[in-house]
Amino acid sequence: MLMPRTIAEAMRRILRRRPSPAPRHLVSPQRRARRQHKSPRRWRRRALALALLLVLGALGATLFTLVTPQEHAAASRVITIAPGTDARRIVRTLHEYGILAHPLPVFAYLILTGHGARLQAGDYRFPSPISPLEVIRRLVRGEVITEKITIPEGLNRFEIAALLRQLPIRDAERALDFTEDVTLIRDLDPQADSLEGYLFPDTYTYTPSTSARDLIARMVRRFREVFTEADRARARQLGFTVREIVTLASLIEKEAKLPEERPLISSVFHNRLRRGMRLECDPTVLYAALLDGEDDRTIHRSDLARRSPYNTYLYPGLPPGPIASPGRESLQAALYPAQTDYLYFVVDGTRQDGAHRFARTFVEHQANVALYRQAQARSTRSSP
């Protein structure tokens, strides 16, 4: 028998229970309509949540693909992107080389960000491993393969062409032919039969798709930048053509070993030209031999009698044209010689830096030559 307290607790439990749903035939039409209205909304919310999860998952997978470095076997290969190549073709090319393992996420990223229109042409090399985002960054920034070549002052066009032939560039074997394209300087030097003297010595960058013609044209453009209109006006003031100044500067470049001596050597040449004297410049004799197919870089007695207009021991005045590429300082020295009355110079045999002794008279010059020969004799005796 239940105690009253127990009965009371049981009654409270019964009263707290939710009533059982009414049978369907007893539910009011209004309540049934509300239930039916809520059901599609609930499914739409679930579908939307599922779609959002799928989108987030896809974005996460795409992002993971884009930022994850990928191994490939084309690290040493040069990839050339031709001008005008669209983003789809670039991505396909990189996929074919194995650099982009999954092209679809990359292409989607390019479309969404607008970077597809910013990819730059050129020659590229991509290390392994590398992430697709890093590949895109390099293409957008145009981080192409670049190498450098320095053309020293005082080289002639044959030597410059020999340097270019050693480079991994297009048409390197035709470099010497391109140094004969005088259309590049026709306005500067109507008499030119080559680009000798106008291939400005400097450091130039190049890529595997650069051609020898491109590099040579850039050397000429660099000459134009350095040899300004003011310099051309100065040449006219001195009574020289551009060709004559470049020729004179090339002689100075070949003779001078110390920067401070360039204006002094220039003054000797200017003084001798005014007097109608032969310049007697050794480098012109070597250049004459080079044009005749002899390149042992040693002056022989027979060379001094060589019937060449470049032989300044035989013919007065300037040679027909430049014999090398002068630098900026030699061009300026040709335009602005030191004010001296020197007519001669010879190497100072007592020094090892290529310095010269200068003289006003032939007697002084002979004394300097004697000192040079004595120094040479001592050097020969002391050598093992």
Image (cartoon, rainbow, N blue to C red):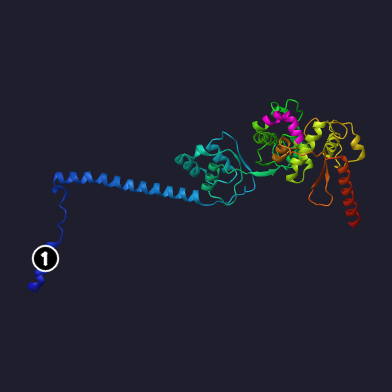
Q: Quadrant of the N terminus?
A: bottom left
Camera-nearest residue between 176 and 229: 229
Residue 338 on image: x %, y % = 74, 39
Question: Which residue is pictured at 46% across the width and 49% down the height?
Answer: 63
Q: Quadrant of residue 185?
A: top right
**246 magenta-colored:** yes
Camera-nearest residue between 296 and 258: 258
Camera-nearest residue between 113 and 8: 113
The answer to whether residue 347 of the structure is visible from this angle is: yes
Local crowd at mark 1 within 10 Å, few (<14), some, or many (≥20)?
Answer: few
Report the magenta residues as a range: 232-248
Q: Quadrant of the C terminus?
A: bottom right
Q: Is residue 6 above or below residue 324?
A: below
* Magenta stretch, main secondary structure class: helix
**29 magenta-colored:** no
Q: Quadrant of residue 33?
A: top left
User: Mark 1 sits on what residue?
Assistant: 12
Residue 210 on image: x %, y % = 66, 38
Q: Is residue 317 left or right of residue 211?
A: right
Question: Which residue is pictured at 89% across the width and 54% down the height?
Answer: 378
